[in-house]
Image (spheres, rainbow, N blue to C red):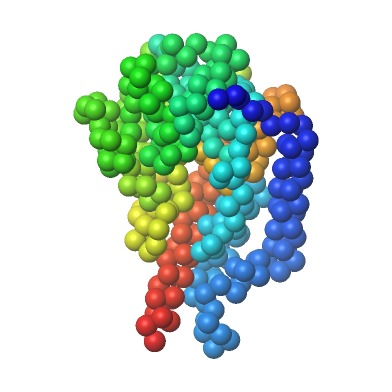
Amino acid sequence: MKKIRATAGSTMMRNAGRAFFSAGLVMALLTSGLPAELAAQGRGGAQNQDLSLPLVEQAFKMAEGRYLMSFSRYCMLNGPNTANGKGDAATPSRLFDNFYYVGRTDVGAWVLRTSDGLVLFDTLYSTDEAESIIVSGMRELGLDPDEIRMVVLTHSHGDHSGGMPYFREREVPVLVGGPDWEGLGGAPNPESIISDGQVVTFGDTSITFLLIPGHTNGTIGAMFPVFENGERHLALLAGGIGPVGGLEQHRTAIDSLAHVASVTESAGVDVFVDPHEAIIDTGAWEYIMHPEHRLPNQNNLIVGADGFQQFIQMLSTCMQARVVMFEQQAAEAGR
């Protein structure tokens, strides 16, 4: 499969469209407090009070500009999706001294360099993309694909797991959250199953795994150190923070977010990475996709420990609002 880079023209058009959407959203938020869809959703008429609205307003107060896309997506039952299925190969780039991006413009793949080899997170849509985007991108960055010691799938959806056979054929161990192995043909051995709190160490680098179900039953997060000009930070790569499904999946996601908040606060996580930055963190998406625009001594993936906790709290509040929406819809339907 021929690797297709985003052309300057197509990139400019996408950026203009994203900027136009974000500007419109920001203006709506600033002029009316909340978008009309958010203010209206859940109301069956003037006589029906929207019980979710106080939670939505609370979440909005915590939403920094870079997270307005996530706010509008997750504080609505049918929020915008500007990413899936619209990606080209992104420009491979170094994000930190020891952490690299080798994914698409709509879904990520990353390489963590340790003193005992490389760890790959996620494998894109297909074996063709594993070779033409991930492996080719690694070589552009001076990383040897033969030094991959482990592949970690953040969850089993096809845009993350489709390239897995490419690496299994090369006998690279693949680790997946336990429940997600069912949709991938079953775990080949117990060592391939990720458990909550598990720590895997390669040389000088330890990776701590969290099970965070909601997006899928086996979605995982991974915590590991990254370095910016030699200064240590702690990153969380979360495999999926948006629940897929209805009421119970949202309750599960709220529990998972509470687990993430507790563990990461204690650990001091100050860097956050998501597979679909375009619908989560537009500041991170711009930083990753346009390395030519990065400013010296400014890494926009470093959000700070307090900033990360505020983001997780915003998401949790949006999920709680959605639970109220589901409950209110069910109550109205039963009348």
Q: Is residue 105 above or below residue 73?
A: above
Residue 47 seen in the current view = yes
Does the rendering let one see residue 133?
A: no
Residue 32 percent location from the top left of the image: 71, 69
Q: Quadrant of residue 86?
A: top right
In the rendered view, tell whether residue 332 sits above or below residue 246. below
Residue positioned most to the front: 1
- Say which quarter of the image contains residue 3: top right
- In the rendered view, does 135 fall on the left or right side of 198? right
Tell me which residue sits at (74%, 48%) in the image: 17
Q: Nearer the viewer, residue 44 or 270?
A: 44
Viewport quadrant of the C terminus: bottom left
**Quadrant location of the N terminus in the rendered image:** top right
Q: Is residue 93 left or right of residue 189?
A: right
Asked if residue 111 lies left or right of residue 20, the reply is left
Q: Residue at x 24, y 28 (%)?
A: 188
Please provide percent x and percent y for residue 204: 41, 15
Q: Residue at x 48, y 17 (%)?
A: 113
Q: Position of residue 88 (x, y in %)?
A: 62, 34
Q: Nearer the viewer, residue 4 or 257?
A: 4
Relative to 234, say whether 334 is above or below.
below
